[in-house]
Amino acid sequence: MLEFRLWLAALPGPVPEAEARSYWNLKDLPTPNLDGALRRAHYVYVGAWHEGHLSDEPQSGRCPAVRISDWLFYRGTIDRYQAPLLDARLRDELIRIHRPRPGDLPAESADAETIAAFLTANLGRHLLPEEAPPATA
């Protein structure tokens, strides 16, 4: 069974729309601005899931990491392609959807305090979901 891991990358600035479009559509096109931003980003581990955690119903992912990944996809692709700005509203939304729900399946997840502290410390940056931080040389 495939396992997925979610890290949040807090980028120092916005991503050009063409590069954000390539990112969200999983296209293998050059994204030099985004690549540089990901190397300078701050990261926090959110959690992991497998295929059984996925759902066809919007916002019903059955673990916190899936819900956060889905919400960032929504915020990054509706109206225009972007790395969403982490403002107080997005921080509060992500903290809310990170909370466990009665129907959640068992899954690895960072504690709520770690997520809240990271989001608060990175207000004003732009968020993207990543499978892992970039390897350091």
Image (cartoon, rainbow, N blue to C red):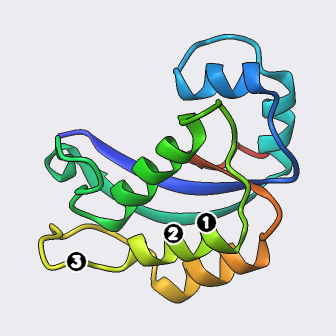
Of residue 98 and residue 35, the one placed in the foreground of this image is 98
Instruction: Specify the farthest residue to the top.
Output: 29
Q: Residue at 48% of width from left, 43% of height from top?
A: 74
C-alpha gap between disc 2 and disc 3: 14 Å
Between the residue at mark 3 and the residue at mark 1, the CA separation in whole angstroms equals 19 Å
Q: Residue at the location (67% across, 49% down)?
A: 84
Give the residue pinned by disc 3. Answer: 101
In this rendered view, identify the residue nearer to me: 49 or 104.
104
Crowd class of label 1 (few under 14; some 14 to 19; many from 20; radius 10 Å):
some
What kind of element bears circle 3?
loop
Q: Residue at x 21, y 61 (%)?
A: 62
- Where residue 90 is drawn, which disc sits there? 1
Percent position (x, y) of residue 58?
Answer: 26, 48
Percent x, y of residue 97 = 40, 70
Q: Which residue is mark 2?
A: 94
Q: Earlier in the sequence, mark 2 or mark 3?
A: 2
Image quadrant where one finds the C terminus: top right
| Amino acid bearing label 3 | Arg
Tell me where residue 33 sits by quadrant: top right
Task: List x then y, in percent, for residue 49.
Answer: 29, 54
Mark 2 secondary-structure assignment: helix
Q: Position of residue 123 (x, y in %)?
A: 78, 70
Position of residue 54 in the picture relative to residue 19 (left or right): left
